[in-house]
Image (cartoon, grey):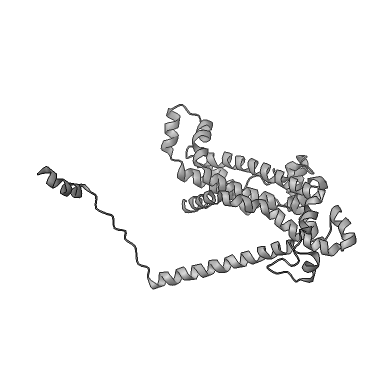
């Protein structure tokens, strides 16, 4: 008898399948989604065409670039621009300097931002509202270029690498993002439990807060890295030694001032200076953009998560 009822009992104990319910989209929703897709496609094309145009020109011959025959596909493919760019010691030195400024400046900026944002996120920190108000004040008002230059001069930072990373080390917007993340993600109960276990504030920050804050660290690190990599105005103001120039200054000289470095000038004596400068500037654009394009895919997931957390939580 029990053997006869066993299949029935097994069917009774078997959980019922969960039916997936979907909300039917209205015609308005469908029209809205189509409009969003069209807008995103147009934005993608608007961003992609200039990139493809630059890459195509960098791989084309100097004569084809100068004559304007290149659009989205290389004409008379050539690596002359990249060879001259990578063989020029000043360009290589600028690339090396930009890497130093981007890596070192990002590390300093992220460290200082976390050191400021975490205490401001704690409700027990005395005077946090006053300090936050002072930080917000600097977003609206600044001392200006001349007072800032005088401060850098008095600190003996002119014509040094520190002038590229110290004056712009902290971004108020990045502090706000990090503080919002800490305040909305790290609960007070977790801090109280760590204190009961004998953890100090620094130990709690290092062992608990930082491992849980990888998304926001990726966000602010990418922001600072892109800023440091693309900056040229600070170098234009504070640096006089060409050996300290970042790559963006070299690129600026070619694009705006229409000057060539040593290796390019030697080749221009036989191939014509202007033609080589046109190819070289496109090659430099690709070379200068390559590090950011290579880094972003690895932190895109953390970047999206960190931005959403910092934006939605108030």
Q: Is residue 13 visible?
A: yes
Q: Using residue 302 as the reference point, say whether residue 97 is left or right of it.
A: right
Q: Is residue 127 visible?
A: no
Which residue is found at the position 56% from the left and 46% from the top? 218
In the rendering, at what x and y percent does residue 169 appear? 66, 44
Q: Is residue 255 above or below residue 242?
A: below
In the rendering, at what x and y percent does residue 105 appear? 67, 43
Which residue is found at the position 39% from the left and 73% from the top? 27
In the rendering, at what x and y percent does residue 144 appear? 71, 52
Quarter location, residue 72: bottom right
Quarter holding the N terminus?
top left
Q: Using residue 262 as the reference point, say whether residue 25 is left or right of it.
A: left
Q: Is residue 61 above or below residue 207?
A: below
Q: Using residue 50 as the reference point, say whether residue 22 is left or right of it.
A: left
Task: State the residue lying farthest toward the right.
Answer: 269
Q: Is residue 6 above or below residue 198?
A: below
Which residue is found at the position 71% from the left and 54% from the top? 287
Asked whether 266 or 10 is in front, the reply is 10
Task: State the residue lying farthest toward the left.
Answer: 1
In the rendering, at what x and y percent does residue 7 appear? 17, 48
Quarter location, residue 116: top right
Asked whether 63 or 1 is in front, the reply is 1
């Amino acid at each position: 008898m029990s053997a006869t009822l066993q299949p029935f009992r097994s069917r009774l104990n078997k959980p019922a399948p969960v039916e997936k319910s979907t909300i039917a989209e209205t015609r308005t929703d469908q029209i809205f989604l189509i409009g969003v897709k069209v807008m995103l496609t147009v934005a993608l094309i608007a961003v992609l065409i200039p990139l493809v145009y630059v890459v195509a020109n960098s791989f084309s011959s100097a004569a084809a670039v100068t004559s304007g025959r290149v659009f989205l596909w290389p004409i008379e493919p050539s690596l002359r621009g990249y060879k001259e760019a990578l063989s020029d010691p000043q360009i290589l030195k600028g690339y090396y300097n930009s890497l130093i400024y981007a890596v070192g400046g990002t590390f300093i900026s992220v460290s200082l931002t976390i050191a400021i944002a975490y205490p401001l996120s704690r409700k027990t920190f005395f005077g946090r509202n006053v300090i936050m108000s002072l930080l917000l004040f600097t977003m609206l008002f600044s001392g200006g270029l001349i007072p800032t230059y005088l401060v850098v001069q008095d600190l003996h930072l002119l014509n040094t690498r520190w002038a590229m990373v110290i004056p712009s080390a902290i971004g108020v917007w990045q502090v706000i993002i990090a503080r919002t993340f800490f305040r909305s993600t790290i609960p007070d109960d977790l801090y109280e439990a760590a204190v009961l276990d004998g953890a100090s504030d620094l130990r709690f920050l290092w062992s608990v807060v930082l491992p849980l804050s990888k998304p926001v660290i990726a966000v602010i690190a990418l922001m600072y890295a892109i800023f440091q990599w693309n900056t040229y105005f600070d170098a234009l103001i504070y640096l006089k030694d060409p050996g300290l120039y970042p790559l963006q200054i070299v690129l600026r000289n070619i694009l705006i001032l229409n000057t060539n470095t040593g290796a390019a000038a030697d080749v221009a004596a036989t191939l014509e200076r202007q033609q080589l400068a046109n190819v070289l500037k496109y090659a430099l654009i690709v070379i200068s953009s390559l590090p950011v394009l290579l880094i972003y895919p690895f932190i895109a997931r953390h970047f999206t998560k960190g931005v959403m957390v910092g934006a939605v939580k108030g």
